[in-house]
Image: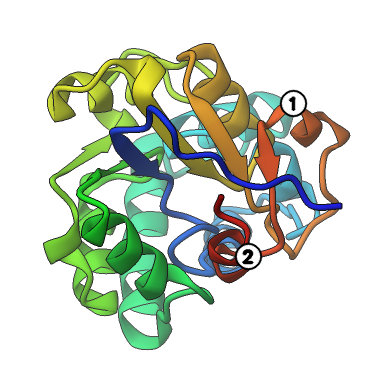
Amino acid sequence: MTKKLDLKGIEAVIYDMDGVLIDSEPVWKIAMEEVFLSVGCNLTRKDFELTVGLRLDEVISFWYNFAPWEGSGPDEVLNQIVFRMVELLGKDGKPLPGVIDSLEYFQRRGLKIGLATSSYEVLIECVLETLKIKEYFVITHSAERERYGKPHPAVYLTAAEMLGVSPLNCLVIEDSINGVVAGKSARMKVVCIPEKTHTPDPGLAIADYQFESLAEMLENIE
């Protein structure tokens, strides 16, 4: 039986972005595969499952240490990937099932709504504009502003502070193991909606709740 979502004591809901609001994980893999291939690094989309949920600079550092390439430096590779992501998301980005309904539901209940993501601010702007959902968010925060990205809890702790809400009264919605660990480490309640394009990590079981989609989550609120 699916565990019902209990919102008692919850004052704010903080969404992750990639894989929660928008089906961007496959797009990330396309953009990274294209750019890495262009610098002579033959990584595949399957390889990138290892770095889901990490900040982009950390992803590039991971793969540079694993399979170093010559020519373009990490900063140039990062900029090329971000540019390609903006192109792809702005062209084809669509909200995942239940996104709009869940935002409207939490707004009606008077909960503060925030966004805390490993993606860069330029991508936050792109996604919110493309999906036309910017108005729902009281705050948005990128881990690029933090010393450490997920699975460190910094991005969620800062988001809670920006919202003026105790971490203990926040609900996080995540899709990756790094994000779930970040939310739990921040002492927040965590809903996990596993990303569908790669094998779910067994560690996702540490989330307080798990649903197939935001739509299913809405059907299971106490």
Q: Please determine whether, in this image, residue 219 is positioned above or below residue 130.
A: above
Which amino acid type is shown beneath numbered disc 2?
Ser
Depth check: 143 or 44 in front? 143
Q: Say whether residue 23 is left or right of residue 207.
A: left
Which amino acid type is shown beneath numbered disc 1?
Ile
Dot 1 falls on a residue whose secondary structure is helix
Dot 2 falls on a residue whose secondary structure is loop
Q: Which residue is mark 2?
A: 213
Asked which colour scheme the image uses, the reply is: rainbow
Q: Is residue 41 visible?
A: yes
The disc at residue 206 is 1
Depth check: 113 or 20 in front? 113
The percent position of residue 201, horizontal first and vertical second, equals: 82, 39
The percent position of residue 51, horizontal first and vertical second, equals: 65, 38
Depth check: 21 or 51 in front? 21
- Residue at horizontal 29 percent and vertical 36 percent from the top: 12
Separation (CA) of disc 1 from disc 2: 18 Å
- Residue at horizontal 64 percent and vertical 53 percent from the top: 193
- Residue at horizontal 35 percent and vertical 56 percent from the top: 82
- For marks 1 and 2 on the same chain, the one whose residue lies earlier in the sequence: 1
Q: Say whether residue 163 is left or right of residue 188.
A: left
How packed mark 2 is, by other alpha carbons closer than 10 Å (few <14, some 14-19, many 20 or more), is some
Residue 66 position by quadrant = top right
The percent position of residue 158, horizontal first and vertical second, equals: 25, 20
The percent position of residue 205, horizontal first and vertical second, equals: 80, 33
- Residue at horizontal 64 percent and vertical 34 percent from the top: 63
* Dot 1 and dot 2 residues touching (CB under 8 Å): no
Residue 85 position by quadrant = bottom left
